Image (spheres, rainbow, N blue to C red):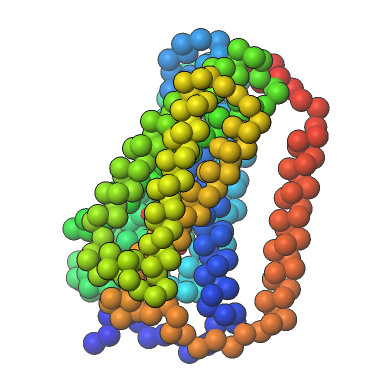
Amino acid sequence: MPLFPAVDPIPLPAPIWLLKLLHIVTLALHFVAVEMLLGGLLLAVLLSLFRSSPASMVTARALARRLTMVMTFVINLAVPPLLFAQVLYGRALYTSSVLIGLYWISIICLLMLAYWLLYRFTARLEAGRSAWWVGLSAWVLAGCIARLLSTNMTLMLRPEVWRDMYSASAAGAYLPTGDPTLTPRWLLMMAGGLFIGGLWLVYLAGRSTFTADEKRFVAGLGGKVAAGFGIVYLAAGLWAASVQPAVVKVGLATHPLYKFAGFAGYGWMALVLVAVLVGAIAGFGKVSSAWLAWSAVLLAVLTEIAFTVYRDGVRDLTLLSKGYDVWDRAVETNWWVVGLFLVLFVAGLGVIGWLVSVVARARKVMEAA
Ligand code: HEM
């Protein structure tokens, strides 16, 4: 009996390479926003808990004010990769989603609660009230959402356990066990939060809304966090790569197409090392400058793109070893629809660029105000 449900007879409406390209680009942007949320929130919580100096409270508030906006990007940049993933991997992803259905659907409630707590955290900080426990609750919920996403994205790669899981519970109330890749993969995303959160502070230190003293504090803290957690992120990445099945490791080194995903893995390591260096310069020198700020942004985006390409290779090679070839689908391209989509996509990016430029030109309000 085949491991995967039968393929949908309706052909794909666009070339597979285009769907994969859009999937990787939008997912990498989702990951940048997710890591900013996970890392920025934890840093704001710790700063507001220890209140070591006036600058630490200014930094906590500066992060918190931006986090509710970051959450909108987490969600809006999650929908496109979800749709592309369903088109490309539906037979695997729908099955695993149904198997953990109760948990999967609970993400909506967890997300709404985390979002509400995020607003409460910001409001309490602005009012000078104790807020760390509210922020910490939001962070724990976000970590649970991340764990459930890692659970589903790894369960979709294990058709061999689906039947037993369904026999154990058809209510979707049963979480999978025995996957050595799940915890390293989740911890990799959690460690990436503090790494990207540190780079975010290095960027913020370059903003003119901080005083000179505050800039030194923000650059010093952000740089040290980025450098320190860059090393942890690297270690977690090596751990997550080492627990992949042998067939995936061989494929990443030798497969004519997926060896590019293997290169992306090395690219990811090199980018994290450069970011550690940038973090160390900003952190130990307490330097804030435009070039450091924009290097931090560039490195954060490139790191997540390289990571997403590598992760895509791991998924495709794992599925391929079990008989699921993502490239083996009937395609009937509707170029009018593809063209319209691309025009709207580019126009959407243009609107976002314009909105960012409006924010950049707006009258500056000092962070401590
Ligand atoms: C606080 C909110 C969220 C957090 C912390 C979060 C975190 C994550 C993490 C950690 C992963 C990677 C899992 C792995 O591969 O190990 C992930 C992937 C993903 N997330 Fe999110 N996420 C959030 C919100 C959402 C929402 C609201 C959606 C859907 C609308 C979503 C859709 C996805 C999809 C589709 C993937 C995987 C795509 C793929 O592998 O092709 N996420 N997210």
Residue occupying the point 59% across, 80% down = 14
Residue at point 38% right, 62% down?
A: 262
Dividing the picture into quarters, in which one does residue 18 lie?
bottom right
**Residue 160 lies in what quarter of the image?**
bottom left
Rendered location of residue 319, percent (x, y): 33, 73
Residue at the (50%, 88%) spot, across then down? 330
x, y percent for residue 304? 49, 50
The x, y position of residue 188, in whole percent, is 35, 46
Q: Which residue is rendered at x = 34% and y = 37% of the image? A: 232
Q: Is residue 201 above or below residue 24?
A: above
Judge whether residue 200 can be spotted in this image.
Answer: yes
Q: Is residue 178 left or right of residue 318?
A: left
Which quarter of the figure is the N terminus placed in? bottom left
* Residue 241 horizontal side relative to residue 271, left or right: left
Residue 64 shows in this picture = no
**Viewed as shown, does residue 319 lie left or right of 211?**
left
Against 226, is 340 above or below? below
Task: In this rendered view, identify the residue nearer to me: 197 or 255.
Answer: 255
Of 342 and 142, nearer the camera is 342
Position of the C terminus by quadrant: top right
